[in-house]
Amino acid sequence: MSKSDDGHDLFGFKSVGELTARVAPKRPSRVKQRLIDASAEIAQSPAEQITYQHTVLCQTGLPYRSPGDEVRLWERQNGRAYLRIEAGGAINPDKGGFVDLPLPFGPKARLILIHLNSEAIKTGSPEIEVEVSMTAFVKRLLRNDPNGREIRTFKDQLSALSAATIRLAVTDGQRAVQVNTQVVTAFDLWFPKNPNQRILWPSTVRLSRDYFDSLARHAVPLDERAVAALAHSAMGLDVYTWLAQRLHRVPDHKPQFIPWPALHEQFGQGYAELRFFRRAFLKVLKAVHTQYPAARFEADRKGMLLRNSAPPIAQRFVLVSNKPATGS
C-alpha cells in the first residue's frame, strides 16, 4: 500500500499531489463561475440595470465570427423579421482616403449594440456619450478594468457597426415596415499610428433618427446581469434575447413547437451538420436557462417546445423623451 514520506496512507495513489488532484473538487472556470454568480443574483433580487435590444435583432443575428474581410453583405431572416447588413468604410487621415471596414461580428458587436440602445432609451436622446458610458459598461461586463487588447476589440466592433448600413424589416403578411439606415450616423474614428498607442473611445455617437424611433417602439428589455454572464458567447446572447422577446408572446395553453432544422437555420452558423449544432445549442441553452430561470421550454430529439413565460424584466420600461434629434 502506498504511503507518503511521513508514513500516511495514500489509498493506492502514488503521491500526495495525485491524491489531492483526484479528491479535491475542481474549481469552476471563470466563465462558469460568472454564470453561477449571476444566476444566484437573478434568483435573489430584481434587476437594477436594464439593457435593451431591438426586437428584429432579437430574432435575427450578426455573424458569430468574422466571415472574412472579403464578405461585405450579411442577410438573415426569422419568420417575419429581416436583417441586412452592408459593410462600410471610413476615412483614414493617415492614408488620405477611405478604408474598408469589416462586417460587425461576435459577442462584442452585440454588446455594443445593446449598450447604445440602452443609453438611447434611458436618456431619451439619440446622441450618446460613449467615452464615459462605454468604459463603465465594459467594466461592469468584465467585472474589472479592461486591458488595452479588450478595449481595442470593442473599439474595432464599434467602428464596424458605425460604418455599416443596417436594414431592419418586419412584415405582417401584406406589408413591410422597414428601416433602411446606418444605425449610427455620426461618429469619429481614431486610427493609432502604432499598435502600442492608447486606444481612445469617440466622445459621442449619434443614432439615426429612423433607428432611434424604431427602437423606441420595438425595444426588448433585458437583465444586464444575464447579458454580462453570457458576454463570452455570441450564440448565448442570441438565444437569451430571442427567448426574452418570444416566450411572453406564446399563447397560454398553446405551446409553440420549433423543429431542429428551423433552429439550425436560425442559430446554426458554422455548423454544417445538425447533430453537432444540436449538441452545441443544448449546451448554450442550459447556460441561458440559468440566467432566465422563468423561461419555460422543453427540448427533445424532435425540436423545442416553447411555453408562455414571464419575461426576464417584469415591466417594459421604455423612457424616450420628446427631445428633438440633432441627426438625420
Image (cartoon, rainbow, N blue to C red):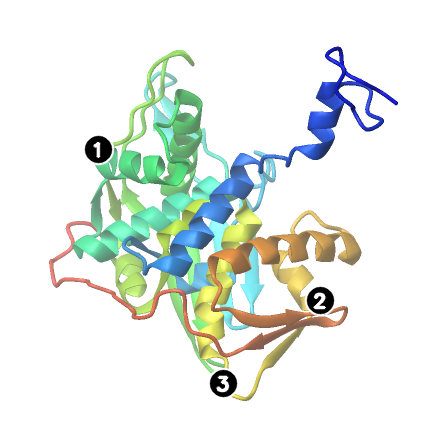
Q: Say whether residue 327 is left or right of residue 10.
A: left
In this rendered view, identify the residue nearer to me: 131 or 178.
131
Residue 212: x percent and y percent?
27, 58
Marks 1 and 3, how far apart in space? 45 Å
Residue in view at x 28 percent, y 60 percent: 210
Say which amino acid is labelled 1: Ser
Q: Which residue is mark 3?
A: 251
Q: Determine the secondary structure under disc 1.
A: loop
Q: Say whether residue 68 is left or right of residue 198.
A: right
Residue 264, quarter of the rendered image: bottom right
Q: Is residue 213 above or below residue 69?
A: below
Residue 87 visible in this rendered orientation of the protein: no
Q: Determine the secondary structure under disc 2.
A: helix
- Specify few, some or many for label 1: CA neighbours under 10 Å numbering under 14, 14-19, or 20 or more: some
1 or 3: tag closer to the N-terminus: 1
Front of the two marks 3 and 2: 3
Residue 284 visible in this rendered orientation of the protein: yes
Q: Which residue is mark 1?
A: 203
Q: Is residue 69 above or below residue 290?
A: above
1 or 2: tag closer to the N-terminus: 1
Residue in view at x 52 percent, y 57 percent: 290
Residue 45: x percent and y percent?
33, 59
Residue 214: x percent and y percent?
31, 64
Q: Which residue is mark 2?
A: 260
Say which amino acid is labelled 3: Pro
Could you tell me which quadrant the N terminus lies in? top right
Residue 204, quarter of the rendered image: top left
3 or 2: tag closer to the N-terminus: 3
Q: Is residue 2 above or below residue 167?
A: above
Residue in view at x 40 percent, y 42 percent: 161
